[in-house]
Image (tube, coloured by chain):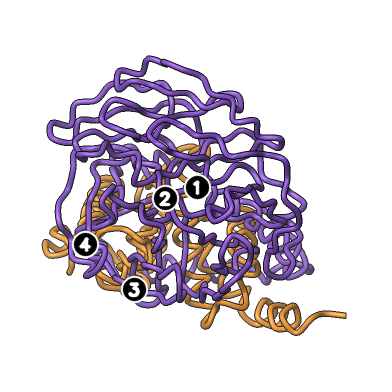
Chain colours: A purple, B orange
Amino acid sequence: MRFEQLLQETIDEMTGEMTAPRAGLAARSMARGRRIRRARRVATAGAAILAAVAVALPWTLLSQKDAAAPSPAAQPTRTPAMTRTELPGGWVVAGVGDQVLDRATNEYVLMRKPVLPAPVGNRILVIDGPESLQLTSVRGADPVTVDPAGLVGTFNWSPAGDRLVGGITQKEPFKVGFAVIDARTGAISKHWIDHDRHDCSRCDFTWTRDGQEVVLPIADRSGGEAEERVSELQLFNAGTGEPTRSLPITALPAGPFAWSPGGRYVVVGPPGTSEGWQLYDTTTGQHRPFPYPAVWVTADVLLATKNGKVLTLTPDGTVTATIDVAAPNPGMITFGPPR
Amino acid sequence: MDTPEEAEFSAFVEQRAHALLKTAYALTGDRHAAEDLVQTALAKAFSRWRRIDEPEPYLRRMIYNEFASGWRSRRRQAEVSVPEPPERAGNRAMEVDTALRLLLRDALRALPPRQRAVLILRYFEDLSVEETAAVLSCRQGTVASQASRGLAKLRELVPQLDWSPDLVEGRH
C-alpha cells in the first residue's frame, strides 16, 4: 500500500476515535480568552512604551489600572511639579512614566493613559487598549484616530517625530509587513515584505537614525522557534518598502538614536530588559557587551538610565556623570534630541 | 445573558469543535492533549473574536502552529514501542493493512511535532509546500526539509511500506 493512502486511512481511523467535546468547552474557552484579552491590554501598552523611539527603560511598570480599564481618549489632567532638566547636547527627557514634556511651554503634563511620546515635536500616541490608537498633541489638541486593523507588535517613533512604524499582518494569505503612520493625519502607508526572503520571528520594526529606513530583525531558527534568535538586521526603504541592505547584527536597536550619529555603531539588546546589551560595529559585525541600553547624543556621549537617574557614558561604557532629573513618579523614560 | 459575541462563539464551538478536536487528535494522538490544544486555540480565538472573519481556517492554523511550536518545549512523549510487523505477502491483506496502520500511527507519534504537522498538512490535508508554509508561518524551505526528515524517519520505522521514489524526494 502506498504511503499517502495508508496515511489517509491511518488518520481517518484515528480521528474516528475522537469523541465529541466535553460539556462546557465554550465557557472554559471564553473564560481563558477574557484573561488573554486583559493580559494583552497591559502587554500592548507596556510593549509600546518599551519600544519608545529614543530608548525606554524600565523604572516601574505602567499603571495597571489605566491599562486594564481603558477609557476614552487620554487628556492631560494636571501639570505636575517636574521641571525640564537640560541634558548633554541639549537633549531632554521627552517623557517619563506618565508625564510628557510639552516643548511649547517646557512643562511636563500628566497623562491619564499609557502614551508614547515623540522624541521631537509635540505629538503623542495614546494607547487605549489594543483596539484604540490615537495621535494627539501633548495637551490633547488635533486628535486623529489610527485604524488598528492589521497592526501588530510595537510602535516606534521616527527620529523627527513625524511618523511611526509598526508591524502589519494579514491572515489569508499570510503576509507580513510594516506600516508607516503619519503623526499629523494618522494616515497609514502599508508595505508588505517578502516573508520567505526576510523571515522574522519577532516582527518588530524600528528606524535608522536618519529616518530613511526601517529595520527588521531576521529570525535565526537554528535554536528552534522559542529561542527568538536574530541572524541579522534587514533594512527597508521607509517610503517605498523596498529592501535596501542587511547588517550583521543579532538584536534589534531600541530606536533610531541607538545608532551613533554616523550610523557606524549601534546599541542593541533584548527589549524590555536592562541586561544583555551589546555595542556593534555595523561595518564588521564585531561587538562587545555594553552596560546599559543607551542613546547616542554625539559620537562621544551616550545617555542611559539607572535607578531613576540619567547617566552619561562614553562609547566604551564608562559612566562619566549622573544627573537627577527629579521625576516625581518614575516610569519609562524617553530621551529626545534638541528641536 | 450571553452577549452577541459570546452567543456566536458558543454556536461555533457547538458546531465545529468536534471537527477541530479530530484534527488535534491526529496531531497529538492523545485525547486529553487534543482537548487542551483545542481549548487553548479557542481561548486565543475568543480573545480576538470580533476581528476573525473565518473562524474555522483561523482555528485550524492556530492548532497546527500551537502544536508545531509551543508544544516543542513540552516533555517529549516516550518513544512508542513498535510491534513486530507481520509478513507483507500472503493472503491476509486486510490484516497486513491494519498492522501497517498501527505501525504508521506509532511512527507518526515518534516524530517531532513540527515534522508531524508538516506531514499531516502535506499528505493528509493535501496542501502544497507553499500552503503548508503559510499555515505554519515558516519558510517553504523549512517545510521541505521537515517533510524530508519526517519521511526519512517514517521509512526507517516502517520499512514494510511501499515507498515511492518521488515521495522520498519530496513533493512540491
Compared across the picture, whether A174 is left or right of B76 comes to left
Residue B74 or B164: which is nearer the viewer?
B74
Q: Position of residue B46 (x, y in %)?
A: 65, 69
* Whole-number angstrom distance, CA of label 4 to CA of label 2: 38 Å
Residue B83 or B119: which is nearer the viewer?
B119
Q: Position of residue A294 (x, y in %)?
A: 40, 32
Task: Tell which subunit mark 2 falls on.
Answer: B
Tag of residue B113: 2
Amino acid type, residue under disc 3 in the picture: Lys
Image point (55%, 34%), residue name: A85
Tag of residue A190: 3
* Whole-number angstrom distance, CA of label 3 to CA of label 1: 33 Å
Q: Is residue B70 above or below residue B57?
A: above
Whether marks 3 and 1 lie on the same chain: no
Task: Tell which subunit mark 4 falls on.
Answer: A
Q: Secondary structure at mark 2?
A: helix
Given this view, does label 3 or label 1 mark the residue nearer the observer?
Answer: 3
| Residue topped by disc 1 | B71
